[in-house]
Amino acid sequence: MRMPVNFTLIIAGGAMALSACDVGEPLPTSEAKLHEATVAAIKGVSPDQIVISDVNRQPAKISWRVTAGERVYACDSDDLYRLPSCTPEV
C-alpha cells in the first residue's frame, strides 16, 4: 500500500520541477550584435554599408534582411548570434 503513495509524490514532484522550466520571453534583439553577425557572415562588407531590416526573433533563431550597397541578403543565426549565415537574394 505504501508504493502508490510514494509513486504519487514522485510524479507530483516531477511535474512541479518541469513547470519551473519556463522558456520565458525571448532575449531582446541587439542591433550591434546583428551588425557584428552580419560582418562575420558577409566577408568584405564594411559595417557602414549595412542596413538591417525585417528582424524576426524566435525562441531559438533570429532572421533578418541586410542591404549592403546594391546587394540584399537573407541572414539568420541562433538566438545567441552564433554561426551567422547570409545568402544573397535574387
Image: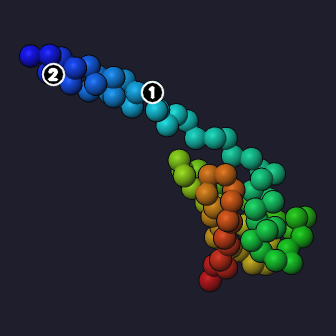
View extreme (left): residue: 1
- What residue appears at the point 40 percent right and 27 percent down from the top-left corner? 17
Viewport quadrant of the C terminus:
bottom right
> Does residue 30 appear in the picture of this structure?
yes
Residue 9 figure quarter: top left
For the residues labelled 1 and 2, the Cα–Cα distance comes to 26 Å
The percent coordinates of residue 1 (x first, y second) are: 9, 16
> In the rendered view, would you say 9 is above or below 61?
above
Q: Which residue is mark 1?
A: 20
The percent coordinates of residue 25 (x first, y second) are: 55, 35
Provide the secondary structure element on which disc 2 rests. Answer: helix
Q: Which mark is residue 2?
A: none
Identity, as a three-letter code, of the amino acid under mark 1: Ala
**Camera-nearest residue between 69 and 61:** 61
Identity, as a three-letter code, of the amino acid under mark 2: Met
Q: How many marks?
A: 2
The percent coordinates of residue 29 (x first, y second) are: 69, 46
The percent coordinates of residue 8 (x first, y second) are: 21, 21
Residue 4 figure quarter: top left
Circle nearer the N terminus (1, 2): 2
